[in-house]
Image (spheres, helix red, strand yellow):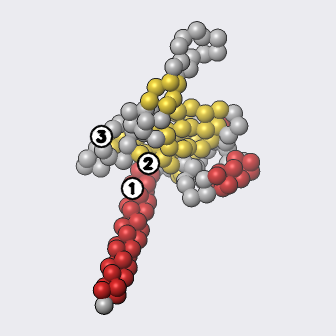
Amino acid sequence: MRRRLRYRFVIAIAGLFCCALASTGQDAKGSIDAILGKFPGYHLLTLKERDSDTRAYILRHFSKANPSVVLADFDGNGHLDYAVLLKNDKSKETKLFVLLCSEDASCRNVYELDVTAYSDLVYLRPVNKGAAVSQTEAVGSSKDSSPASLKSAGIQVVYFEKGKVVLY
């Protein structure tokens, strides 16, 4: 009897956990849809819009992640923020937008970068709080580029086989 009760308890906890995960996924999708609503005429840069080598690399290494979205707390306020790669439906202009969100779920665009020239190569990855990154200057600069530890999450913008930049 006790064993059966324990089994039912484990099943109930697993069911609640699965429901919570499904709900979180639906919440994130709804949030992305709300973000896209702020940019009429744009869509998330799709995997099909990347070149074949970039697409293959993303599928091999990040098959479950969306390479056009990073959700993390970039400003340390305890609320999810967004970095998105959006492509204009008509002009084909592609931009990285960073939106910081507040407690009431309102988000404001704080950064915009035109990546049109690299739209077939670019993808996003999260950088965890506490990761060591270094600031670099132009080639030949004598400035010290000692690593710093991120105080909140960052965004890695990867230009496949060309370069990487961390925004924080």
Where residue 43 sits in the image (x, y, percent)? 53, 52
Q: Amino acid at mark 1?
A: Ser
The local secondary structure at tag 2 comes to strand
Q: Which residue is mark 3?
A: 77
Image quarter for residue 77?
top left
Mark 1–mark 2 distance (CA, rounded to whole Å): 10 Å
Which of the two discs, 2 and 3, labels the residue nearer the N terminus?
2
Image quarter for residue 121?
top right
Is residue 98 visible from the viewing direction of this image?
A: no
- Please tell me which residue is depicted at 37% across the width and 82% down the height of the picture: 7
Is residue 119 visible from the viewing direction of this image?
A: yes
Q: Amino acid at mark 2?
A: Leu
Q: Amino acid at mark 3?
A: Asn
Q: Is residue 3 left or right of residue 48?
A: left
Instruction: Specify few, some or many for label 1: CA neighbours under 10 Å numbering under 14, 14-19, or 20 or more.
Output: some
Mark 1–mark 3 distance (CA, rounded to whole Å): 18 Å
- Please tell me which residue is depicted at 48% across the width and 35% down the height of the picture: 131
Q: Residue furthest front?
A: 2
In the figure, 25 relative to 66: above or below?
below
Do the numbered discs 1 and 2 sit on residues whose CB atoms are within 8 Å? yes
Q: Name the quarter where the N terminus is drawn.
A: bottom left
Do the numbered discs 2 and 3 sit on residues whose CB atoms are within 8 Å? no
Q: Is residue 16 left or right of residue 111?
A: left
The local secondary structure at tag 1 comes to helix
In the figure, 24 relative to 82: above or below?
below
Mark 2–mark 3 distance (CA, rounded to whole Å): 14 Å
In the figure, 24 relative to 95: above or below?
below
Q: Which residue is mark 1?
A: 31
Where residue 106 sits in the image (x, y, percent)? 30, 47
Q: Which residue is mark 2?
A: 71
Instruction: Specify few, some or many for label 3: CA neighbours under 10 Å numbering under 14, 14-19, or 20 or more.
Output: few
